[in-house]
Image (cartoon, coloured by chain):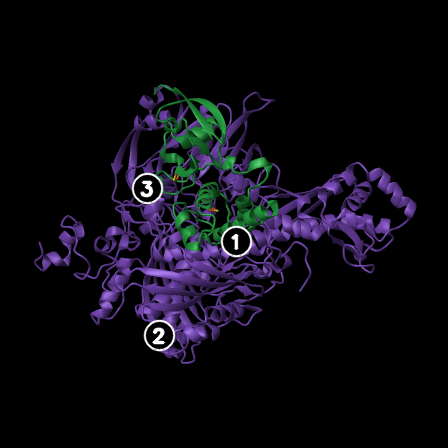
Chain colours: A purple, B green
Amino acid sequence: MTDFSIIGKPIAMVDAAGKTTGSGKYTDDLNLPGMLVGRILHSPFPHARIKRIDTSRAAALDGVVAIVTGKDAPNPYGILPVGHDEHALALDKVRYVGDNVACVAAIDEATADQALELIDVEYEVLPAYFDPEESMKAEADLIHDNKPHNLEKDYHHVFGDPDKGFADADHVAEARFIANEVTHAAMEPHSTLAQFEIDSQTGKRGRLTVWSSTQVPYYLQHKLSLVLEMPMAQIRVIKPLVGGGFGGKSEVIPLEIIAAIAARAARAPVKITYTREEVFWAHRGRPRTIIDLKTCVKNDGRITAVKARVIQDGGAYCSYGVVTILYSGALLGALYDIPNIQYDGYRVLTNKPACGAMRGHGTVNVRFAFESQLDELAAKINLDPADIRQRNLLQPPCVTVNGLRVQSYGLPECIEKVVERSGWKQRKGKLPRSRGLGIACSHYVSGAANSIIRSDMPHSTVNIKIDRDGGVVVYTGASEIGQGSDTMTAQIAAETLGCSLGRVKIVAADTDLTPIDIGSYSSRVTFMAGNATLRAAEQVKKQIAAAAARKMSCAPEELIFRDDSVFRKNGHVGTAAFGRPAEQGSSASVSGRVEGQILRGSLQQKRKDEGPKDWMTFEEAVVAAIDFHGALTGTGSYAPPPEARGGKHKGGGVGPSPAYSYSAQVAEVSVDEETGEVTVHKVWAAHDCGRALNPVSVEGQIIGSVWMGMGQALTEEMVWKDGMLMNPGLLEYRSPSSVESPEVEPIIVESIDPEGPFGAKECSEGSLAATIPAIANAIYDAVGVRLHEVPFTPERVLAALRAQRGQKKINLTEGIDPTAPAKFREHGGSLWFRGKGPERHPLDPARREGPAEAAGGD
Amino acid sequence: MKKELIELRVNSRSYELAVEPSKLLLDALRQDLQLTGSKRGCDDSSCGACTVQVDGVPMLSCTMLAASCERQEITTIEGVSGHGSLAAIQKAYGDWGGAQCGFCTPGFIMTVTHLLAENPRPTEEDIRGALSGNLCRCTGYSQMYQAIKAAIEAEQKGMAEAR
Ligand code: FES
Ligand code: FES
């Protein structure tokens, strides 16, 4: 193994102390003199035309400085160029309960809240659509006039020859799977602070500065420019610490624009911070997804074809929807070798908050269906579920049938490792009744090979500056959101330059200071910003090496940079061995700086007297280089190679990535057959991250992904009633607490990607998708029921167990008519077998209309 | 609402503040004293991000009136790191990945320091129980347990060295 001094070592994040002491600043922690508080008026109706807004009573309230409505920012925007369908504040129509109608900027929160009550809005309520399959039938009262049948987008892909694949198969499994809607619920509610400056030349309103909890400062800058009709150069976006994103901050959220237009109208800085309920309305989470899946295998377990029809309940706006529906199909490939794929995807608009990108974007729900079905097929042909996965491995390097290039591929090792660590071979099938083991796999992109806005622009650029103090300043647009982006950047810079971590300062995510990086989403930062950092550091290193080599009378290639010094390869390797005075230490930045700044002159003199040496300190080398070249700066960029950019088919731009991460997991669960409650005891999760740059962070990301997957598998679900979110709080949404969270054993697998920085790939998303089917398969192992709807709440598990006891064929979605949402959707899609569920309350509308009544009930 | 003058003792210092009787302790800390380490993560006292200690007991500052805390000793996250260096638990949270985005971290640390004061050798069960009132969306909690164990060890080592 290559010997690194910083890469691969578990270290505390470079910004950890700010977080553990409370001194780190998140957006809502910032204050400006004269700052106003903004509060937003939201729509109480799921679909309505705004006939009139009267703000005069609110404006008259003492302490109210400005009120803005849709008229103040009429330009539409959206994260995707094809989806500019949003207005920060509704122009003529509201499309979900919680849609933004007006904003009050006032001297304090209480005044702003009071003013909201005084805004009179007259609505004309329109028929609304809550179920995607129902919504697709709409002829009139469309959610967006230019989207017939409320269909945002549909794709129909055929790769290989699926019909032949089906004909060749020995076994077929076919079923409908449903995954309900979940949301990021990052702990930090979204917050934005906006301030305009007055221009010295014109004396009028000038530049805008926005501090915001965002994963994508450059997209925010771009959309602000679009809506406010200001050049991008006049807008500065700064990303302070961000308290978690998971995709929920990976596009422009209405408050970010509203704060700016409110600040413009109020002529004062305005800060808006969402309440938790507003965060749920802002949403952009994982859509409720209906998956009709058919998988065919030969007797030996080889998959011959897969056919998937996917419907996503996208909510009221496009958001990332077109990308989400494409990911659902594209990432059927690149995990296993599937020769024939047919995919039909429908992204449908409904009158609910928009869904967008969430950890594992687009891949998670389909993966749940696929891995469950594969388990079913393994049982059918009597094959160990781990074996069936091993029989369908890709043979990389290769390009999949749908055009995805795969190079490093740690999946075989991941499967091996989890099988071994979990004692799969010895324990599977031998656990007591109601306890079981399940296995599943997943994968994810290390950044999208094609950016949202198609262009030849590099996806990441990083600048490095080193001055005479020997401090290394790295300017990166990459957004630290808790995943360790800044730490990764510092590690790569320090390793490449052979200096200590303490020397490296990170300036990140400030559009005035840092070069463009398209943001922290699709797990792209380590791979892309990491590569850009590596290139920038190498460029600077070259300049230092040239100067140092002259001083040492050798070729630059002979030099090694390590432990804050530069020395000759052929000499003596090792800190103490190459003649360096021991007391200088290897990473003593303090003494180094003293030497660099004060003693430099005399030291250089001394060196001159002594003639060429075979080592120098890092500062000496830096000073030599600055004397030689002037200021030391380097820049590096990364753009994915053309070979990795995918097929030419329509929609082929989504799914390709320069590298994929791989995960295999085993979950151990028990099921309480009386209550239907599922307990996850342990999850073994092996993840191929290419190379673990910082193992603590990698393990943290794996555990966090598995944990979030477990939340979706067991408890988390957005419950809707007529477009109203019934559980807009963290407790009702049921984000798992420490007592409900299982032990997760992360297992790092390193496949060393040929193009990743030091071989690294993503580690923050790929593990999530495997957890849900691993739990589903473990439940099957434990009690023999196959669950088709996530989350596996006690009521769903119990219903399945009851059906099993009644010797009835088990299929949870059986008998559910998608055209009859009233029966299907009450309580947000809980599925009861007719007449077999618990007693309903007499006032429950489902009971009054249900078959029980027809059969003579009350 | 008319403001009233109250005296709050926060992190061993006394402050005189003019606040509305309805002002929450969390808002008094964050807005009036600029102690922004305590966070607001929810609307309904469900997340624990605002946890501070009142007379040594962890409390949700988002559900307490500032005026009701007079004559009580309030400790916030800003009061944990003494002498300009990290307390063992803070260092361990950093080293072991107990904090990712860090938004929940101050609340957790206030809960954990109380746990360790009450029960210097907690079992994993004790720890899980004690942390269950604080939510984290990043870590899945696992690395926090490692951090807490490491902090206990560091404290014990420190005490042994001091002896
Ligand atoms: S802010 Fe969530 S509990 Fe206090
Ligand atoms: S570290 Fe992000 S919420 Fe806990």
Residue A327: x and y in percent read: 45, 58
Task: Name the residue tied to disc 1.
Answer: A523
Q: Residue A172 carries which label?
A: 2
Q: What element carries label 1?
A: loop
Does A845 appear above or below A224? below
The chain holding disc 1 is A
Packing grade of label 1 (10 A; few <14, some 14-19, many >=20) is many
The reply to whether residue A604 is visible in this rendering is: yes
As measured in the structure, the alpha-carbon distance from the residue carrying label 2 to the one carrying label 1 is 34 Å
Q: What element carries label 3?
A: loop
Task: Name the residue tied to disc 3.
Answer: A95
Residue drawn at x 53%, y 48% as measured from the top left: B151
- Residue A752, image quadrant: bottom right
Callout 3 amino acid? Arg
Packing grade of label 3 (10 A; few <14, some 14-19, many >=20) is many
Tell whether A807 sits left or right of A703.
Answer: left
Label 2 beta carbon less than 8 Å to ligand 2: no
Locate ligand 1 by image quadrant. Answer: top left
Q: Which of A443 and B90 lies nearest the eye of the viewer?
A: B90
Residue drawn at x 56%, y 69% as measured from the top left: A398
As measured in the structure, the alpha-carbon distance from the residue carrying label 2 to the one carrying label 3 is 41 Å
The chain holding disc 3 is A
